[in-house]
Image (cartoon, helix red, strand yellow):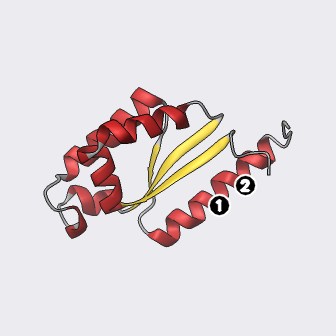
Amino acid sequence: DGFETRVAVERKSLADFAKSAIHDRARFGRELELLAGFQAACVAVEGDLDRTLRGEASEIRGVSGASLLGAAVDIGLRYGVPVHWCGSRQAACAFTERFLRQFVVLHPEVTP
């Protein structure tokens, strides 16, 4: 409680990240603008970057791995919201938990 407007992780499956970052960029851009206003925020992708770049990620039909990498880099530079390729759903969950817990450790003060 108290951290909802200070820290956030937008966790996305690889297919959802492709849809949001490529096909629905205007809507996703508005979400990223909101995330950029947080003290700490990131996007955690439940996908493996290496597999994606090699074209082995069948869940992203019609989108090249290079396009997704470009979108991820653009998001980080344009909005200041880094994109973390976590490899799997389980890894993304572990990353999300650690990211949020570490923020609380580093910034324990809660504003009402």
Q: Residue at x 39, y 36 (%)?
A: 29
Q: Residue at x 20, y 46 (%)?
A: 66
Residues 8 and 64: in front is 8
Q: Amino acid at mark 1?
A: Glu
Kindly identify which numbered label has been placed on residue 97: 1
Looking at the image, the residue that sits furthest to the left is: 62
Q: Is residue 3 left or right of residue 95?
A: right
Tag 1 secondary structure: helix
The image quadrant that residue 37 belongs to is top right
Please provide percent x and percent y for residue 43.
48, 48
Mark 1–mark 2 distance (CA, rounded to whole Å): 6 Å
Instruction: Say above or below: 59 vs 8.
Output: below
Q: Count residues near mark 1 (Cα–Cα under 10 Å), then give few for <14, some for 14-19, many for 20+.
A: few
Whole-percent x and y of residue 3? Answer: 74, 45
Left or right of residue 4: residue 74: left
Towards the viewer: 33 or 96: 33
Residue 58 place in picture, x, y as percent = 20, 69
Q: Where is the C terminus found, in terms of image quarters?
A: top right
Quadrant of res 55: bottom left
> Which residue corresponds to the image point at 84% horizontal and 40% vertical from the top-left?
110
